[in-house]
Every structure is written in C-alpha cells, then in structure tokens.
Image: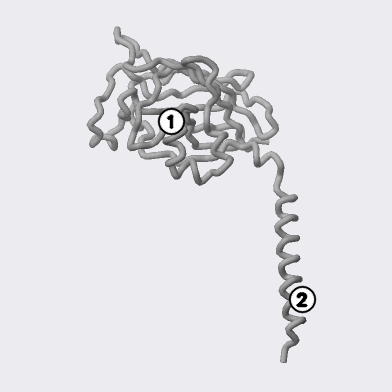
C-alpha cells in the first residue's frame, strides 16, 4: 500500500517544480515583449479598390471642391523598434469608416449608412527619418456597435503588424469589445493619447531589432 505521506510529498514536489518552471519561464521572457503594440484582426474591409489617392490628407480629393463630411482630426505618431528607436521609411497603410460609419468597400454594401464621395478612406505612407507619420482625417463613425477605430498595416525592416487604434473617449464601448478586452492590460497600447481638441498621438512599436 502506498504511504499517504509519500503521495503528499510527491504532490508538494510537483507543485514546487511547476511553480519553479513558471518563474523561470517568466524570467526567460524578453522584457521588450511587453513594449510591443498588440496585433488585431485585419477585418473585412481592407480597401481593394481606392479613390485614386492615398496621401496623408484623407479629407480632400483632387478635383473635389467639397471636403469630407465629419469632424476633422489629426492623428500622428512614430513607428519604433522594440528598443524604442525610430524606424525610418516604414510602410504605414491605414483605413477607416467615414463619419457615418460606412466603409468604401463592396463587403459593406448592406450597411444603410451613406457613402461619402469626398472621403479618401485610405492612406499609404512612409515614415520620415525620425519614424514619424501624420494624417488628417475625420473621426470615424460607429460601425456595428464597435468603438471608433482606425485600421493599420505597418511594415518595418523585418516585421509586419496588423492592428487597430482606438480613441480615449470610447471607454464604454471598449469595455464591451472582445477584441480589446481579451488583451487585458495590453489594450492600453492600442488607445491613442488626446493632445488637443482634435488631435491624437499614437506610437506603434514593432518587434524589429
């Protein structure tokens, strides 16, 4: 018959071993991983067809007298490597809904919100020597109950990140969004900082060395 004390000693030893392994795994985890911007889903509305322009001002199109409808805002930031150094010439693609919450995409055809023929909806940029990027756009409208957001596809020297940026005013909606809540404390890295009444700053940190 097995000695109960032996079983208890074995169980205690197993727990200590597991705890030790967990501690070692945590210690082995590189510190820079905690700095990275979390990934998010690409979503169904990556712009396969575009308005013919992809510059940093999404509110104006050549040959259009009118500006895009909605509240005009500035969004800017930097693309950084995992050690906090700027990445120059990083490719930054971004897209969003218009002020009514409609994407200029065939898959959003069932959306009853109107299209905006004056809204570019997409930008394809490169960061400058300091890793900086900046856009002029409109505050995205609400779509499907999700918090307002802008989609990003960022390519550095060696890595690519698909993610989304959120606005600080959307606290209630963010708390009910699974794509955000599953990130726990990491969700804070997806929320832009408001620097002015209509300006937001958001840095993107890639795993590039």
Q: Which label lies toward us, 1 or 2?
A: 2
**Disc nearer the start of the sequence (1/2):** 2
Residue neighbourhood size for the residue with mark 2, other residues' Cα within 10 Å, grouped as few (<14), some (14–19), many (≥20): few
Taking the image as shown, residue 203 lies to the left or right of residue 16, namely left
The colour scheme applied to this rendered structure is: one colour
As helix, strand or loop, the secondary structure at mark 2 comes to helix
Q: Is residue 36 above or below residue 8?
A: above
Q: Residue furthest bottom?
A: 1
Residue 56, horizontal then vertical, whole percent: 46, 17
Residue at 59 percent across and 24 percent down: it is: 78
Which quadrant would the C terminus be assigned to in this image? top right
Q: Is residue 55 left or right of residue 111?
A: right
In which quadrant of the rendered view does residue 25 lie? bottom right
Q: Where's residue 91, x and y in %?
A: 53, 27
Instruction: Compute the Cα span from label 1 to label 2.
Output: 54 Å
Tell whether label 2 touches label 1 (CB within 8 Å): no
Which of 40/11 is in front? 11
Residue 156 x/y as whole percent: 58, 32
Q: Residue furthest top?
A: 65
Q: If the image is split into quadrants, where does the N terminus sit? A: bottom right
Q: Is residue 173 left or right of residue 18?
A: left
Whole-percent x, y for residue 136 in the image: 45, 16
Query: Residue beneath label 2, please?
Result: 9
The secondary structure type at the circle numbered 1 is strand
Q: Residue at x 28, y 35 (%)?
A: 108
Q: Which image quarter: residue 7?
A: bottom right
172, above or below 25, in the image: above
Residue that carries the numbered disc 1 in the rendered image: 149
């Amino acid at each position: 018959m097995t000695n109960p004390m032996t079983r208890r000693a074995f169980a205690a030893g197993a727990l200590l071993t597991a705890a030790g392994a967990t501690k070692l795994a945590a210690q082995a985890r590189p510190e820079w991983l905690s700095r990275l911007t979390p990934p998010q889903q690409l979503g169904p509305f990556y712009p396969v067809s575009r308005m013919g322009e992809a510059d940093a001002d999404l509110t104006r199109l050549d040959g259009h007298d009118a500006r895009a409808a909605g509240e005009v805002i500035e969004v800017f930031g930097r693309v950084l490597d995992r050690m906090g150094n700027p990445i120059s010439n990083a490719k930054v693609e971004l897209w969003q809904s218009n002020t009514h919450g409609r994407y200029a995409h065939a898959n959003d055809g069932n959306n009853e919100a109107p299209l905006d023929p004056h809204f570019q909806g997409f930008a394809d940029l490169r960061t400058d020597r300091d890793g900086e990027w900046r856009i002029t756009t409109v505050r995205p409208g609400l779509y499907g109950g999700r918090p307002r957001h802008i989609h990003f596809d960022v390519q550095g020297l060696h890595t690519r990140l698909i993610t989304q940026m959120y606005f600080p005013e959307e606290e209630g909606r963010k708390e009910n969004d699974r794509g955000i809540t599953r990130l726990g404390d990491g969700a804070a890295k997806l929320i832009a900082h408001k620097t002015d009444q209509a300006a937001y700053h958001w840095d993107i940190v890639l795993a590039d060395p």
